[in-house]
Image: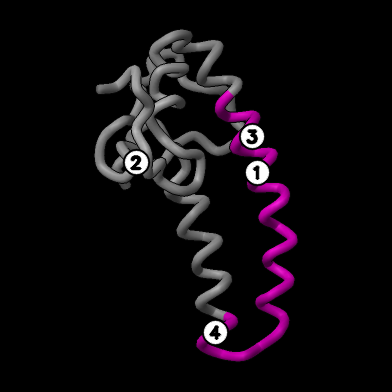
Amino acid sequence: MYNVNFTPCTAPMKAKYVLATGGPYRYIRHPVYLSESLGTIFAFLATGVWANVFGVVSWLALIEQAKAEEASLERKFGKIYTDYMKRTGRFLPKLVRSKTMT
């Protein structure tokens, strides 16, 4: 896993924390959540088992979890994280760069 800081949501953030902005984090802030969501879709498409579709409900929880993580990281890293958020999408890459980046 690229993010060396992985911390379960039930544990406090480590005192020494490195902001991951390389690898898949260069394009999106939550690549693990995206892969879990895509896995739900592919499991349904591959099996046709409708029970997999109920995983879509968990996406609402992922959105809230992502927002909470971002607020925590913004408090910890301040402007560095705010700038990172402007460059990257939450779950999908930003296709258009802002004028401030050119």
Nearer mark to the viewer, of 3 and 2: 2
What secondary structure is marked by label 1?
Answer: helix
Please name the residue shown 46% across and 59% down the image. Answer: 35
Please name the residue shown 25% across and 22% down the image. Answer: 102
Task: Determine whether label 3 and label 1 are within 8 Å by CB.
Answer: no
Which labelled disc corresponds to residue 45? 4
Counting residues from the N terminus, which is met first, the one under dot 3 or under dot 4?
Answer: 3
Separation of marks 3 and 2 at Cα, in angstroms: 26 Å
Left or right of 82 in this view: 49: right
Q: What residue does disc 1 label?
A: 63
Which labelled disc corresponds to residue 10? 3
Nearer mark to the viewer, of 3 and 4: 4
Q: Residues within 10 Å of mark 3 (few under 14, many from 20)?
A: few
Which labelled disc corresponds to residue 21? none
Separation of marks 1 and 4 at Cα, in angstroms: 23 Å
Q: Residues within 10 Å of mark 2 (few under 14, many from 20)?
A: many
Separation of marks 1 and 2 at Cα, in angstroms: 17 Å
Q: Residues within 10 Å of mark 1 (few under 14, many from 20)?
A: some
Amino acid type at circle 4 is Leu
Task: Determine whether label 3 and label 2 are within 8 Å by CB.
Answer: no
Left or right of 51 in this view: 47: left
Separation of marks 3 and 1 at Cα, in angstroms: 17 Å
Counting residues from the N terminus, which is met first, the one under dot 1 or under dot 4?
Answer: 4
Separation of marks 2 and 4 at Cα, in angstroms: 26 Å
Q: Looking at the image, which residue sits at the far bottom?
A: 48
Amino acid type at circle 1 is Ile
Asked whether 51 or 94 is in front, the reply is: 94
Asked whether 99 or 53 is in front, the reply is: 99
Q: What residue does disc 2 label?
A: 27
